[in-house]
Structures are given as structure tokens and as C-alpha cells.
Amino acid sequence: MESLKQRRTIRKYLQKDISAEQLNELLATAFRASTVGNMQTYSVIVTRDADRKAKLAPAHFNQPMVQSAPVVLTFCIDLRRFSKWCLQRNAQPGYNNFQWFVTGAIDALLAAQTFCVAAEEAGLGICYLGTTTYNPQQIVDALELPELVFPITTITVGWPDECPPQVDRLPLEAIVHEEVYHDYTPADIDRLYAYKESLQENKQFVLENGKETLAQVFTDIRYTKEASEAMSEVLWKAMKQQGF
Amino acid sequence: MESLKQRRTIRKYLQKDISAEQLNELLATAFRASTVGNMQTYSVIVTRDADRKAKLAPAHFNQPMVQSAPVVLTFCIDLRRFSKWCLQRNAQPGYNNFQWFVTGAIDALLAAQTFCVAAEEAGLGICYLGTTTYNPQQIVDALELPELVFPITTITVGWPDECPPQVDRLPLEAIVHEEVYHDYTPADIDRLYAYKESLQENKQFVLENGKETLAQVFTDIRYTKEASEAMSEVLWKAMKQQGF
């Protein structure tokens, strides 16, 4: 519990490998996570090879962790293995649709997060790459993912070479609703975001970007409406391309 | 690590409450999980009230855990809170699209799974309800979820009143691919599913359902093509209805 509370994302890694034995034990532990109908509708692609990392890097906007981490794990929705089993057992699979895309994503993400918890408990550091759903087609190509397999998240893993301060989180009351959703009043929003807005690093972030508010850094620079809409189309198209 | 390996899903709970203090500590721990851009694009609805559970139950096909567990947690994608903050800070949010639906789902699921790990370490038992994405509109209605909020998974939580045997998992080599996706040959499928098919409870399951193969129990009874396609439309429609 304490390690869960104290965790922080690690983006700098020692030049030290993770043994296949240790990695496999962590993965086996991850696969004990809950999975719909015990179907395990996911696969994990392990990238250690430098050339393969170089192929993956542009899909992740060349974030340096992709090439500096000893191991990169791409967690994929996988309805292919299960469907192949069905076909080979005189059964007609019907898993090439949106419901199973989402179900496979849930399965894959529960396994991914369990991997991270186990890895952090073993002293490793991890970083999730949200870029996975921004450029899925490039990842499909780099990892040779066939139909009914789709990359949903990527984790870089290695031995920590930094100990960054823990970042802030919203207060519990911002996230938790008793019985029904309690919509936020303007006063709620002011109160719940006050601490985040008061942080020196966030004030600096606003200044550096020449913006008036922290929210504008998100909407105008980090995650713009235009980019989000373009990436929605790319994601949708890639999902269809992979047969869902 | 050992508790992760030994875990099992718990569907029967003691008639014993979980204190608000303990639940809040577990939730606060869960919210330390990684989140895209530190945006925390999720909310959690806590259901303890018997009447509210009764309203939720049909959405989960009346699985008894919904009403017998002291606490039901519905983890939701939430782009509403963040968008409200943006609007209040002279920033134009662009998060009502498919990319952020998926990103919010990732955020919510990492928090959900971290909650489960922490809860199990504290001696609690959990069960995920995959039905959440089958009947999202009923859940939206029961929990009064407004635009840009969407239920992605549900967890029932309580003190275990059973200790079921651990269920099987596919061998590691079924899930893990080195460097690129290695597609499965018919011989691979036979080998990887042999243990699952050999289990007495699965043989019994095939017999009871009057089927030839275990795969047919999945395709013809548990998760049919027709139902999956219908539920895909329902899910898509509910996603649009909630403004994504």
C-alpha cells in the first residue's frame, strides 16, 4: 500500500537490463488481473532491440524513454487469438466489433496496471505513453500487428535513475461522488483547482508559454481541440483498419 | 507481489460494512495511478444505498453482487470537470471526442485497477462487472451522469465470505510476443488452449450446455455475435448521447 501511495513516474533509467526471468515473472503476475469471461483478450509485445525501438520512437513523438528504457511494453487489445481458437473448434466468433474493442481495452489495461504495480514493488520505474492512441497505425506497422490486434497503451520500464518529486492530485472530493453524480458549481471548480493553480511550477508553466491561465496551456498548446479531433479520426480509422 | 499472484475474484461478501475512512484511503491511493497530463479524466460514483443498488442491478443483469456487496463503485470517464475548469479559465476545451473517450477510459481503468490492488491487500474482495459497457444508458440514468461522463467499469467490494479456487490462465507464451507479433499456427492454438480444455469444470461446462466444444459455449451462449453487435450499437449510441 505504501509503495502505491509513494509512487512516481520514472522517465530516466540506469543503463542496466531487466532479466527475461524477472520480466516474465512480472508479466505472469500481471496476467492474474481480472479478465472478462477469463478470455484474456490482450497480448503484450516486448521491445528490447534498439532498431525496433528506433522504429517505435516516432509514433511516440520521439519521447526519449522509448530508446533509453531497457524494455518497452506495448499492451494490445487482442481478439485474434480467441477468434482463431473458436474457428478451430467449430465455433463462430463475433468479436470484431466496438463492444469487444472496448472490452479488450479494459482487459489489457487491468493487466498493464497490475504489471506496473508489481514492477514498482520490485524497485523498477515505469512511464505510460499516452501517445499510443495518437499514432496507432505507426505502432501497428512497427510491431507487425495483424487484424483484431490493437495497441492501447505503452509502458517504458527500467531501473530508476532519478527520484522526481511527487506531482499533485486533485482533492478526493473532486473525483468521488456519493450515490449520484454531483455536478460542479463555479465555486466548486475554483476550490478544487486552487491548489493545482497555486503551485509554483504551474505558474511558471503558464508564464513560459505566454498564457493567462493554466487551463489555456492545456487547450492551446498541450491538447488542442484541432489535434484531438484529428487524432480521433486517426484512432477510429485505425480501429476499423484492424477489423473492429 | 505475493497477494497479486494469489488473488481471486470474490462474489460473496460478509454482511459487514466498509468504513468511509477506509474506502477514502483506498480511493486516494488509487488516484496516485498514472494519468494522462495529470488531468485525472475520471470520476467514481460510490453506491451504498439499497434503493440505488436496486436501480443499478438490472443494468448488470441482476448479478447478485450488486445488491449483496456493501459498496459498488462505478468508474467513469469524466471530461466534464476538466472542460468546466477550462471554460471558467477563458480556455476552449476540445475533449468531446473519441480520442478523449479512449484516453478517459485508460485513466479511469488504471485508477480502478490500483483501487483493486490496494483493496485486496487490505483484505477486501472485489469483482469487476463487465456488464457496465453492455447497458451504459441504464447506468447513466441510475447514477444521473451528465454530458461528458461515461461509465466504463464497475467494481463490487466487500469482506470475503468465500475462498474460491484460483481460475486458470493461458500460458505466458500465449500472451507475450518478442519484438513483433508472432501469429498463431493451428498447432500453437491447440497447445495454448490444451490445459484450459482439459479442466474438469470446463468439460462439465460443455456437457451442461449441450455443446461440442468449450469455444462454442462462448460463441453460442455466453457472448454471441448477435448480442455483441447489438451491444456495440448500444455502446456507440450511449457514447454519442453523452456528448463524445
Image: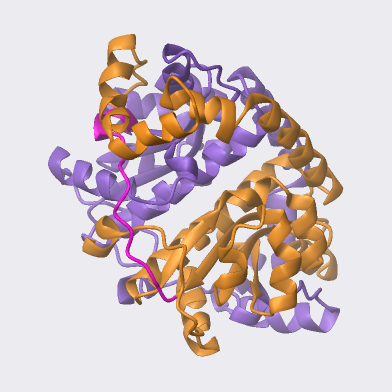
Chain colours: A orange, B purple
The number of numbered discs placed on residues in the rendered structure image is 0
Is residue A40 rendered to the left or right of residue A192? right
Q: Nearer the viewer, residue B166 or A124?
A: A124
B30 drawn magenta:
no
Residue B4 appears in the figure: yes
The quarter holding residue A10 reads: bottom left
Q: Quadrant of residue A46?
A: bottom right
Q: Identify the residue shown where x is 39% and y is 60%.
A: B9
Is the residue A227 above or below the residue A128 in the image? above
Whether residue A164 is in magenta: the answer is yes
Give the left or right position of residue B48, taking residue B128 as reference: left
On the question of residue B179 being in view, the answer is no
Determine whether, in the image, residue A27 is placed left or right of residue A176: right
Dominant SS type (magenta): loop
The magenta segment: A159-178
Q: Quadrant of the N terminus of chain A?
A: bottom left
Residue at the spot 74% in from the left edge and 41% down from the top edge = A235
